[in-house]
Image: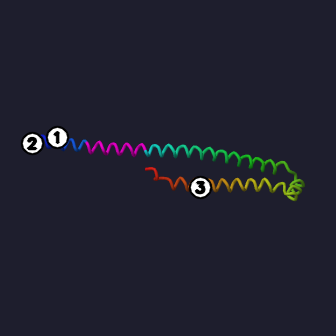
Amino acid sequence: MIFEISIIVVSVTFVVLAVYLILTLVQVRRTARAAEALLIETRGLASETHHVFRIISRGVQMLSALTDGCGALRVFKSVAKGDLLKPIVFLAAIVKGLSVGLKILRRETQKGGDDHV
């Protein structure tokens, strides 16, 4: 009688352990899928950020070449025509876009921290 009860208790314990193990493995699988999706999204954002930095670098090089290559008279003439204003506005727009993009990236990474666990 005691032997049968102990076998029943061990069997029930094993079933409960198996159920919790299965539930844990399912949750680990969900977390791994979410981590993979986040990794793919992060790689895309890194690629876009690299592209933005290249554009900024080109804008800075343009601005540097513009300021180095112009004489005093040509600079005033260019300012009067508005030719110097266009690259400055272009560079300011790129910097502002990068700033907004990084704020959104920071907000999204902080917001989505524990959603997948």
Residue position marked by numbered label 2 in the rendering = 1
Q: Residues within 10 Å of mark 3 (few under 14, many from 20)?
A: few
Q: Residue at x 62, y 44 (%)?
A: 47
Q: Image point 56% across, 46% down: which residue?
A: 42
Q: Observer-nearest residue: 67 or 20? A: 20
Q: Which residue is mark 1?
A: 7
Quick check: 115 left or right of 61? left
Real-space Cα distance between discs 3 and 2?
A: 67 Å
Residue 29 point in image, percent of width and height: 42, 43
Residues 10 and 94: in front is 10
Residue drawn at x 74%, y 49% as measured from the top left: 59
- The residues bearing labels 2 and 1 have C-alpha atoms spaced at a distance of 10 Å
Left/right placement of residue 21 relative to residue 106 reads left
Q: Position of residue 1 (x, y in %)?
A: 9, 42
The span from disc 1 to disc 3 (Cα, nearest Å) is 59 Å
Asked if residue 9 lies in the magenta stretch, the reply is no
> In the image, which disc is placed on residue 104?
3
Overall secondary structure of the magenta section: helix
